[in-house]
Image (spheres, rainbow, N blue to C red):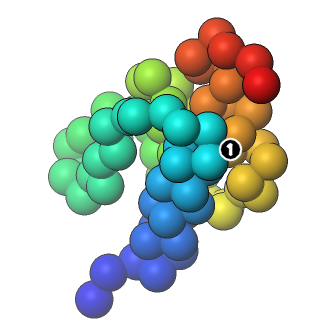
Amino acid sequence: MGCARCDQLQSDVRDVLSEMQIAADIRHVTDIREISHFGILGAPALVINNKVVAVGEIPPKSLIRRWITDACGIYF
């Protein structure tokens, strides 16, 4: 059984990227060694360009959009 909240966050990120017309690699990481590398102790978590931006919550799409915008250095 998977993590429903993780699946929801991944879906929200895909939606935002599609709305912004940005192609990006999205990875659903389950390897505990890779997760611990970032110091993540809760799920779901969102890492953008190797920076942890959310842990233990499903942030609103508006916030996900802002993080992606900041990470890409583009503004809509």
* Depth check, front residue: 34 or 5: 5
Q: Position of residue 42 (x, y in %)?
A: 52, 59
Residue at 46% x, 81% y is: 4
Asked if residue 6 shows in the view, the reply is yes
User: Is 42 on the left or on the right of 7, as rendered?
Assistant: right
Residue at 53% x, 37% y is: 21
Residue at 46% x, 60% y is: 10
Q: Position of residue 75 (x, y in %)?
A: 75, 18
Q: Amino acid at mark 1?
A: Ile
Examine the image and state in which quarter residue 53 appears. top right
* Depth check, front residue: 5 or 40: 5
Is the residue marked by circle 1 packed among few (<14), some (14-19), or many (20+) residues within 10 Å?
Answer: many
User: Is 45 on the left or on the right of 70, as rendered?
Assistant: left
Q: Which residue is mark 1?
A: 64
Asked if residue 53 shows in the view, the reply is no
Most extreme residue toward the top is 73
**Total numbered labels placed on residues in the image:** 1
Image quadrant where one finds the N terminus: bottom left
Q: Position of residue 59 (x, y in %)?
A: 72, 56
Q: Position of residue 25 (x, y in %)?
A: 32, 37
